[in-house]
Image: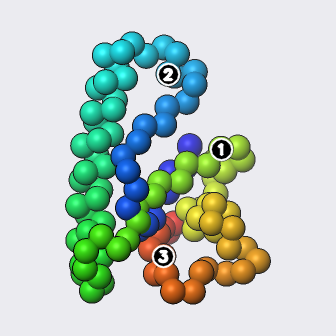
């Protein structure tokens, strides 16, 4: 499964596929929720540093993770972002600096 981080701040959440979630105990879910919360905190800190390095102050940025479903196994992160944000026909939105952190080589 391809995962994509963009420099765009969202609340920490947990998305677990239904099959895996069925097999998880309450303790497993609590551990996973805690781990994701810690990772999200670290990623938010990193995003704030990146935003500050670009001259942005405060929390006027968003951080999102796009996890595509379906036929995206070998698709470059840039193309996943384009599909997720539906920029194919209109291009990247004006007034936003979109930074794809896991660019393809």
Q: Which mark is residue 69?
A: 1
Q: Quadrant of residue 86?
A: bottom right
Left-right relation of 104 to 82? left
Q: Quadrant of residue 101?
A: bottom left
Q: Which mark is residue 98?
A: 3
Along the viewing direction, whichever of 56 and 101 lies nearer the viewer: 56
Q: Residue at x 48, y 14 (%)?
A: 23
Residue pointed to by mark 2: 21
Q: CA distance from mark 3 to mark 1?
A: 22 Å
Indicate the position of residue 99 as horizontal and vertical percent values.
44, 74
Q: Residue at x 66, y 50 (%)?
A: 72
Q: Residue at x 29, y 82 (%)?
A: 56
Q: Residues within 10 Å of mark 3 (few under 14, many from 20)?
A: some
Marks 3 and 1, the one that precedes in the sequence: 1
Q: In terms of secondary structure, where does tag 2 sit?
A: helix
Q: Which mark is residue 34?
A: none
Q: Residues within 10 Å of mark 1 (few under 14, many from 20)?
A: few
Left-right relation of 2 to 50? right
| Residue 32 visible, this orientation | yes
Q: CA distance from mark 3 to mark 2?
A: 32 Å
Outermost residue, right side: 89
Q: Residue at x 36, y 15 (%)?
A: 26
Q: In terms of secondary structure, where does tag 3 sit?
A: loop
Marks 2 and 1, the one that precedes in the sequence: 2
Marks 3 and 2, the one that precedes in the sequence: 2
Q: In terms of secondary structure, where does tag 1 sit?
A: loop
Indicate the position of residue 104 as horizontal and vertical percent values.
51, 66
Q: Residues within 10 Å of mark 2 (few under 14, many from 20)?
A: few
Q: CA distance from mark 2 to mark 1?
A: 17 Å
């Amino acid at each position: 499964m391809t995962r994509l981080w963009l420099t765009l701040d969202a609340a920490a959440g947990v998305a677990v596929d239904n099959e895996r979630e069925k097999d998880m105990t309450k303790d497993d879910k609590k551990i996973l929720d805690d781990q994701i919360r810690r990772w999200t905190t670290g990623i938010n800190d990193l995003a704030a540093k990146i935003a500050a390095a670009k001259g942005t102050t405060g929390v006027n940025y968003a951080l999102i993770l796009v996890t595509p479903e379906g036929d995206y196994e070998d698709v470059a992160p840039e193309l996943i972002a384009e599909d997720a944000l539906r920029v194919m026909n209109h291009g990247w939105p004006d007034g936003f600096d979109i930074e794809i952190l896991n660019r393809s080589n």
